[in-house]
Image (spheres, rainbow, N blue to C red):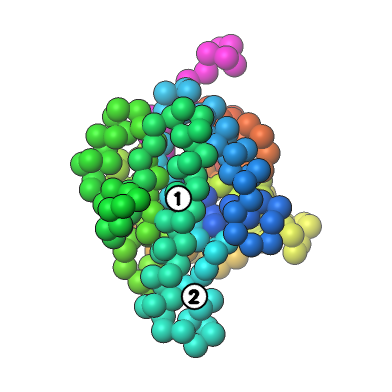
């Protein structure tokens, strides 16, 4: 089949972006160059007709766990982290809409001046109308990571796979930045990812949700131009956990 005629392997995906990725080349906050680049990558995928849900972490602004380690009340710290994910969602929405793509930002708790509340059927309707849905605020509850929130939203919105955007080109037996001999996996089972202490794809609660509900995770390097689209088309990019 001609490469140009390839069709996406999935109809609806959830794209999970870490807060750290939003920093790009900066040391804190949001790198405008990176989010504009990312918006272009998302646009190239959107043009294939796929339906996209986006969940972004907040670690570039504030991490609840880090705040609690410094003596802050954990619940307060986690809510601050949730607000950081909404901040990132607003930036991502702006970048995507500048590319003339209809986008809706929904949040786990109500901030009606800037976003819709997360309502499952409304979100699904937006997706059916070919709008990109960005979900911020995690689950709206403390003590739950954005990885787990992403897995929950993927299940609620009937996504077929989670595409986890990272800074490495897949999943390794160990951290490749610490061990140059670490083995890269082209494919991996969710069972192995769940049981292994050395494979840090997502937290175990998120992996267990994917494992018990049979949803694939695709881990790829977001910094390489075109990788998101290649992964979506089923090319050998990153690692597929299934």
> Quick check: 212 above or below 51?
below
Label 1 neighbour load within 10 Å: few <14, some 14-19, many 20+: many
Which residue position is annotated with label 1?
89
Mark 2 in CB contact with mark 1 (< 8 angstroms): no
Q: On the rendered structure, is 106 left or right of 168?
A: left
Q: Which residue is drawn at 48% across and 23% down?
A: 47
Q: Tell me the magenta residue range.
A: 1-13
Quadrant of the rendering where the N terminus is positioned: top right
Q: Which residue is drawn at 52% across and 68% down?
A: 62
Say few, some or many: other residues with alpha carbon within 10 Å of mark 2 (under 14 / 14 to 19 / 20 or more).
some
Task: State the image quarter where residue 176 is shown.
Answer: bottom right
Q: Position of residue 120 (x, y in %)?
A: 23, 46
**Which residue is depicted at the point 43% across and 76% down?**
77
Identify the mark at residue 108; answer none if there is no mark. none
Q: Which of the two marks, 2 or 1, is nearer to us in this view?
A: 1
Find residue 65 and name its label: 2
Q: Residue furthest bottom?
A: 71
Does any portion of residue 219 appear in the rendered image?
A: yes
Q: What is the quadrant of residue 137 in the picture?
A: bottom left
Prevailing secondary structure class for the magenta stretch in the rendered image? loop
Q: What percent of the width, then of the height, locates residue 162? A: 44, 45
The stretch drawn in magenta includes residue 63: no
Q: Visible in this render: residue 192?
A: no
Measure how far apart labels 2 and 1 are at the Cα level.
20 Å
Query: Residue 171 location, x and y as percent?
Result: 61, 51
* Secondary-structure class at tag 2: helix
Picture coordinates of residue 182 (x, y %)?
A: 72, 57
- Count of all numbered marks drawn on residues in the image: 2
| Residue 116 or residue 42, whichever sits in front | 116
Q: Is residue 160 left or right of residue 41?
A: left
């Amino acid at each position: 089949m001609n490469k140009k005629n390839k069709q996406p392997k999935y109809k609806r995906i959830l794209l999970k972006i870490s807060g750290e990725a939003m920093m790009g080349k900066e040391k804190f906050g949001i790198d405008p160059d990176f989010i504009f680049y990312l918006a272009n990558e998302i646009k190239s995928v959107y043009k294939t007709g796929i339906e996209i849900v986006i969940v972004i972490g907040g670690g570039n602004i504030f991490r609840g766990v880090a705040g609690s380690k410094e003596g802050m009340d954990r619940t307060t710290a986690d809510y601050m982290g949730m607000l950081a994910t909404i901040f990132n969602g607003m930036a991502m929405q702006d970048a995507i809409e500048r590319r003339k793509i209809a986008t809706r930002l929904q949040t786990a708790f109500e901030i009606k001046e800037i976003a819709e509340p997360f309502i499952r059927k409304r979100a699904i309707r937006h997706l059916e109308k070919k709008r990109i849905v960005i979900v911020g605020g995690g689950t709206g509850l403390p003590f739950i990571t954005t990885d787990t929130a992403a897995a929950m939203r993927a299940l609620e919105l009937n996504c077929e796979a989670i595409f986890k955007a990272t800074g490495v080109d897949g999943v390794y037996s160990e951290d490749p930045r610490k061990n140059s001999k670490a083995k890269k996996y082209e494919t991996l089972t969710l069972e192995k990812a769940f049981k292994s202490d050395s494979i840090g794809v997502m937290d175990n609660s998120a992996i267990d949700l994917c494992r018990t509900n049979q949803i694939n995770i695709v881990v790829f390097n977001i910094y390489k131009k075109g990788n998101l689209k290649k992964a979506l088309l089923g090319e050998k990019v990153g690692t597929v956990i299934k």
